[in-house]
Image (cartoon, helix red, strand yellow):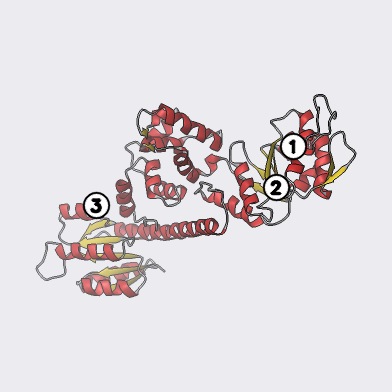
Amino acid sequence: MPTVLIIDDNAAVTIALEVLFSLHDIASLRAASPEEGLEVLGREHVDLVIQDMNFTLETTSGEEGVALFREIRKRHPDLPVILLTAWTHLDAAVELIKAGAADYLSKPWNDERLLTTVTNLIELGQANRALNQRLQRERKAKRELEQNFDLRNLVWQDPATERVLTLACQVARADVPVLITGPNGTGKERIAEIIQANSQVADGPFVVLNCGALPSELIEAELFGADAGAYTGASKAREGKFEAADGGTLFLDEIGNLPLAGQMKLLRVLETGRFERLGSNRERQVKVRVISATNADLGAMIRAGTFREDLFYRLNVIELRLPPLAARPGDILPLALSFLRGKTLHPAAQAALLAHTWPGNVRELKNVMARASLLAQGDIIKAPDLGLPLAAAAVQSGDAEPDRDAIVQALARAGGVVSQASTELGLSRQALYRRMERLGIARPT
């Protein structure tokens, strides 16, 4: 049951509020002075405070209430406070609202309005605590990942990326094939590097073959090597990627482009560790950890007969699904800043980056930042330098004040980074702090 602390020297007021709250399943505590109120706050869990503004007989200045409010904010900055007084001073009310008071009501109060305000603030407080707990868990998990594993200096912040990294590090030391799926440009090779760096063969070679960058007739030679004369132009023997990766990891990007003949040979290598060079009858033995990646629908390819089902299951012992950049917005600004060299981003440019859908994912973002760095006239990259659609960013930065849901969602996407959330909402950081305080949204810790 939520609890409200009533700080008022008038017993009639305190009793009336206690009765009102008890009828709506809200517990209440009472204090007759600022000193007693602060003492109660120091030992009891309280969800909201309702405080009077004057405690000394014949005093109407509100100075005692102002002092109490500021002390509460100092000791409990996230606790919502409703100011209640029979002597309404508009200037004082405005100043205290700016300082973070949740509301300012005059006596006699309207029960319905007061209940609505109290209920909303308590619900907001509960949602904020849940958000803060989630953010704290995410920050703790991020710190543990960075401390316990070699993440190859990967720049990331979004929880969706964290989930992929956690699983990647968890399976890194298992000697099983891993299949990384996701759209082009999302960073699948970086995830493969992280798996290699934390594996039992971390000291071995990390060899990359993009199966989509070679003609189908040359992929087998690249994989398994070829003896002299094995095909036209093969004037001397050549080592394949499997031999080069012996004792380490072989990363096969765009595995869906591997022809059926190559798929059959790859399956045999995965099962036995043995293969033959093209044009050779001599078997070779290797010990290689295979990580593959694709943006293709391998299930559809199996149904179409262009990809072997048995190879799919052999490669897919562990599957890591890397979401597109648009599905992990918390990564956008950290990545953008990492691609800059000696330049900064104007707030409007940050808003434009967050508003863009990034069909080309991280690769597109990197190219956009490289182009913007060249086009920018000074050290600050502005929105026009990016060459991105700005309509969505313009809406975000309009005059309409964001509501509570918009602020909470922006904070969640920003991983609790207020400066990033304020940019997305088109506000200054100070303006966002004021809105958070007015709506009872706790500051991320």
**Cα–Cα gap, marks 1 and 2:** 28 Å
Q: Amino acid at mark 1?
A: Ala
The image quadrant that residue 129 belongs to is bottom left
Task: Indicate left or right for 25 with 179 as reference.
Answer: left
Mark 3 or 2: in front is: 2
**Callout 1: SS:** helix
Give how far across and how far down residue 64 sits, in percent: 16, 66
- Total of numbered circles in the picture? 3
Spot the residue most to the right: 281
Spatial separation of the CA atoms under disc 1 and disc 3: 59 Å
Q: Which residue is mark 2?
A: 249
Per the image, the residue denoted by label 1 is 300
Give the answer, above or below, for where 319 lies relative to 69: above
Question: Which residue sits at x=54%, y=40%?
Answer: 325
Query: What is the secondary structure assignment of the residue under circle 2?
Result: strand
Q: Is residue 413 visible?
A: yes
Q: Is residue 8 above or below residue 186?
A: below
Residue at mark 3 = 98
Task: Return the x and y of residue 88 as percentages of the image width and height.
Answer: 16, 57
- Locate the C terminus by quadrant: bottom left
Identified at 58% across, 40% down, the residue is: 186
Which residue is rendered at x = 31% and y = 54% of the image? 437
- Closer to the chain start, of discs 1 and 3, is 3
Between 325 and 38, the one lying in front of the other is 325
**Is 323 left or right of 54, judged from the image as shown?**
right
Amino acid type of the residue that numbered disc 3 sits on in the rendered structure: Lys
Question: Furthest residue to the front?
Answer: 236
The N terminus sits in image quarter: bottom left
Amino acid residing under circle 2: Thr
Q: Residue at x 52, y 44 (%)?
A: 328
Residue 32 in sight: no
Using a 10 Å C-alpha cutoff, classify the residue at mark 1 as few (fewer than 14 neighbours), some (14 to 19) or many (20 or more).
Answer: few
